[in-house]
Amino acid sequence: MSESIQTVDFARRATDGKVNVLELTLDELKAWLADMGEPKFRAVQLWQWLWQYMAQSFSVMTNLSKAFRARLEECAYIGWPHIDRTQVSSDGTTKFLLRLADNERIETVLIPSVSKSDNVRWTQCLSTQVGCAMGCTFCSTGTMGFTRNMSHAEILGQILVARDYLHDTRPQWPVLRNLVFMGMGEPLLNYRNLERVLVSLNENGGLNFSPRRITVSTCGIRKGLEELGASGLAFLAISLHAPNQALRERIMPGAAKWPLEDLLATLNSYPLKTRERITFEYLLLGGVNDGPEEARQLVRIVHSVRKSKINLIVYNSTPGSPYQAPSEDRVLAFEKILWDAGITAVIRKSKGRDIDAACGQLKASALREEGQTEDL
């Protein structure tokens, strides 16, 4: 069975046997339409309607013949995620709880920033899995366990929902500028679909995101890192959070199965483009990893990896969490040790605190309200 046919079969819904065309990459769409006897340019036209003009029905695709649209209606549909809840912070950060076709729910977040010309630009944080298998003890998603991987349509559907919300309909001057795969799930454990998504993001005539505007954040999966590096389809961020293996095993048990020393060795051979650096994400947990000794250990790690930088993130306390936010004095002291060692370190400005914008918190809140917290 060909790859394109396998993908089409995966895209079918048991209810009516139709194909969700958002599940198909452009090459897969061409192959599917070729099987229907349609020319390749029809796939390009359909792709543009789906991803650039964000059409939600075939009836609006006026440059396609009525006969072709009728044929699509018979065998296909356009399936977006459904917005279950929306929360808007006082700082503009906007969080969506999205319901997927099988009623599973995931989160995505829009984060605003103001450019030098005072125009608002947005970054979107994307999920790749329903739940997460890594079990990081400080993460709300980690407490939910793993349900399943998200598909091509479900991952990219988050972007369609966000662009529709922002009325972002001008692809040549988009207000949604940057994407970070830093939401629910470990992206590299869903690498097959992640790679297809990254390919689709880079296609002209659709969403058209440059790899320089896409970041994949991972706690470190050996095979996935090697494949992502070879693809060149996105920048890399490493969710580090622990500067030694012992602490890594305690707070990041899933990630710690790959020893820190081996992860760092792999990063030193990771292919980087000109001016590209590996970003280390480091979540400061009060009294856990925010002391001077941890800062000095982190200095040694960063110095051991070529072309890298640090993003410091101040932990936001969540209901039932065993962790607390560090004091401002400890945060600044930690940052100073890094800067004194010649390391580029930025304290990432916290956004959306008043809406619990950290990964998994909105879904956890919804489950508590619905009395479904027995497995959390």
Image (cartoon, helix red, strand yellow):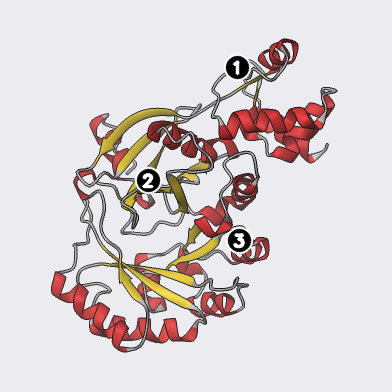
Numbered disc 2: secondary structure: helix
Looking at the image, tell me whether mark 3 or mark 1 is earlier in sequence order.
1
Mark 1, Cα crowd under 10 Å, few <14 / some 14-19 / many 20+, is few
Mark 2–mark 3 Cα distance, whole angstroms, equals 23 Å
Quadrant of res 15? top right
Q: In this view, does 102 lie above or below 135?
A: above
Q: How many marks?
A: 3
Amino acid at circle 1: Thr
Amino acid at circle 3: Gly
Mark 3–mark 1 Cα distance, whole angstroms, equals 34 Å
Looking at the image, tell me whether mark 2 or mark 3 is earlier in sequence order.
2
Label 1 sits on residue: 15
Label 2 sits on residue: 144
Q: Viewer-proximal residue, 284 or 95?
A: 95
Q: Residue at x 64, y 62 (%)?
A: 232
Numbered disc 1: secondary structure: loop
Looking at the image, tell me whether mark 1 or mark 2 is earlier in sequence order.
1
Q: Viewer-proximal residue, 150 or 36?
A: 36
Residue 223 image position (x, y, % from top left): 63, 64
Amino acid at circle 2: Met
Q: Which residue is drawn at 69% across and 15% down?
A: 69
Q: Viewer-proximal residue, 194 or 164?
A: 164
Numbered disc 3: secondary structure: helix
Q: Residue at x 71, y 33 (%)?
A: 44
